Amino acid sequence: QKEVEQNSGPLSVPEGAIASLNCTYSDRGSQSFFWYRQYSGKSPELIMSIYSNGDKEDGRFTAQLNKASQYVSLLIRDSQPSDSATYLCAVIFDYGQNFVFGPGTRLSVLP
Amino acid sequence: NAGVMQNPRHLVRRRGQEARLRCSPMKGHSHVYWYRQLPEEGLKFMVYLQKENIIDESGMPKERFSAEFPKEGPSILRIQQVVRGDSAAYFCASSPGPGQGAHEQYFGPGTRLTVT
C-alpha cells in the first residue's frame, strides 16, 4: 500500500515564526517529492519539488528530504497570515508518474 | 502562457444525468491527470493520460467513469448516471513530460460538480 502521511493539523504559529510541516511516505524507492499549497475553495499551487537528499531553499520556503528515514519536510520562515492554507505533500512512488497526495496539514498563522 | 483551463467551473446535474468535464493543459504540456477531492478530504488520483493514450487509470471507478485525451481538443472526464456521491471538486493537472521538471504538475481551477 502506497501511503503518504502528514502531521495532523491544524498547526497554529504566530506571525514571524517558523512553521514546520512534516510528511512521511511508505516506499523507500520513491524518487520525487512535491509540496503544494491549497487555499480554501481553490486549487493546489506548486510550492516546490525536491529530488535529492538535503535542503532546497526558495525564498522563505525550505524543503528537506531524507530518503533513508522516508520523510520530507517544509519549513516556512517569517510566516505571514497569507500563508494560512492547507499544505499538501505529494510523492511519486517508484518510477511511476501519478502523485499520491497526503491528507494535508492545515496551517494557521496568527497575526 | 495560459495556465491549465477547466470548464465548466460549476456544474449541477440531477441524479441519472451525465456530467462532462473538460480540461485544456498548459501550453507545451502533453500529460494530463485528473483528481477528485471530496469536501474536507484530500486529493485522490483518478487517471493519467497522454494524447490518445490512457497511461494509468488505477484510481478510476470501474463503472460510470471514463476519460479521454484526443489528438485534438481538451481532455474530457465523463461521468454517466451521476449519483449524489459523485458531488465533489474535480481537478485537472498537466505536466510537460520528458525533461527537467517533467513531473511537476500544475493544476487547473477545478470543476465543482453538484448532484441534486
Image (cartoon, coloured by chain):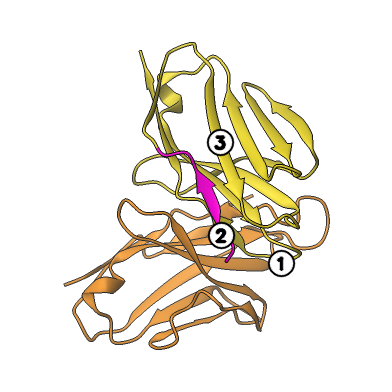
Chain colours: A yellow, B orange
Q: Residues within 10 Å of mark 1 (few under 14, many from 20)?
A: few
Q: Which residues are magenta?
A: A1-8
Marks 2/1: CA–CA distance: 16 Å
Q: Main secondary structure of the magenta part?
A: loop
Residue appearing at x 64%, y 46% in the figure: A34
- The answer to which of A92 and B53 lies nearer the viewer is A92
Q: Secondary structure at mark 1?
A: loop
| Disc 2: host chain | B
Name the secondary structure under disc 2: strand
What residue is disc 1 on?
A96
When the figure is inspected, residue A43 is found, relative to residue B13, above or below; the finding is: above
Provide the residue designation for mark 2.
B93
Q: CA distance from mark 3 to mark 1?
A: 23 Å
Q: Which of these two is toward me, B27 or B77? A: B77
CB-based contact (under 8 Å), mark 3 and mark 2: no
Instruction: Tell me if residue A6 is in the magenta stretch.
Output: yes
Where's residue B89, x and y in %? 36, 60
What's under tag 1, amino acid-wise? Gly
Looking at this view, name the residue that lies furthest to the right: B99
Quick check: B10 above or below A37?
A: below
Q: Residues within 10 Å of mark 2 (few under 14, many from 20)?
A: many
